[in-house]
Amino acid sequence: MTTVPPANIPPANPSDAARPPFRHELYPYRGDGQFLSGTLGYIHEALEGGEAVVVAVPSDKASLLRRELGDESAVTFVDTTTLGPNPGRLVGAWVAWMKERGEGDRPVRGIGETAWREARSAAHLSELRYHEWLLNRAFAHSSAWSMLCPYDDADDDRSALESLSRCHPLIRQDGHFVRNEGYLTAEEYPFEVLNPPCDPFQELSFTHGDLAAVRAKVSRCASDAGVTEEQQRKLAVAVTEIATNSIRHGGGRGTLRTWTQDATFLCEFRDAGYIPDVMAGRTRPTVDQVGGRGLWLAQQLCDLVEIRSTRDQGTTIRLHVDVPH
């Protein structure tokens, strides 16, 4: 890591100079005292520059900040728990929050602390890290200037902190941000390899005219796994969208696999297509947009969605649904 020269700090007024790149900072801390000192310093910098602030942190941390800030109108607190467990919904939510607060040309700062210890599985952790990396793409040309991501390092888990730091170009230390030499650019970001399906799994090849068979297969397997009827209705919509995409864009055919693992029902779709847009399904489709709604719907309807797509190996999409105990 190398220290960023003070000249790289954005000016207070965006009209005074060309808007700098989005600043995405990781803030490792230990204890409430360090949490408050780092986040309050970041917020006061924003207020002095006439910027708005959006805060999405766990409820106990939000209470700490509210007591210190009082009724500061430029600071908005949002609750990410209303979005459900799927990290695939977070980018779209942040885009909406930042757009709402960034009236006109007003820059916005975000503070987002992910509840890492509440991750439900290794796959969930992987998607949380991927979400953090995608924020760099989502706000590369937005009205937001920066985002601070507090991370509770109380467990002193070096491997976890190292993995997370790869998603952040900057790290905040002692009230200043420094460049992170371990940050992975778009060309370097390594997708974590999907584990093979658990035995026993069900498999079905499908093509044109087989959507009803795909839905029926998923319905039977989901019911056997204990998925509720309401979850099955949502899953049926997501399955239809993803299978349709395989037929339309994946060479006219695909393969469905279903299995249950660790109180989760999974549907996996494989085809020969390629999805070049890493933001596909992460942001809300526009009213006049042609296509692109299938992945968005799947993200809204499932508890987790994993997407792996390369030109040489095609596309694999896994839909996760939590099974009630």
Image (cartoon, rainbow, N blue to C red):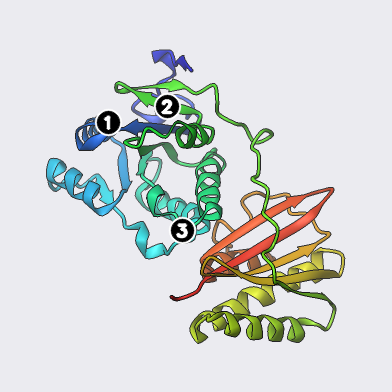
Residue 287 visible? The answer is no
Name the residue tied to disc 1.
38
> Could you say which disc has been placed on residue 120 in the image?
3
Looking at the image, which residue is at 75% across and 73% down? 244
Mark 1 vs mark 3: give the one in front: 3
Q: Amino acid at mark 3?
A: Arg
Name the residue tied to disc 2.
171
Decide if residue 72 is on the left or right side of residue 51. left
Closer to the camera, 20 or 42? Answer: 42
Give residue 25's position: percent from left, percent from top. Answer: 42, 32
Looking at the image, which residue is at 65% across and 49% down? 278
Q: Secondary structure at mark 2?
A: strand
Looking at the image, which residue is at 67% across and 64% down? 198
Q: Pick whichever of labels 1 and 3 is earlier in the sequence.
A: 1
Quadrant where the image shows the C terminus: bottom left
Q: Amino acid at mark 2?
A: Ile
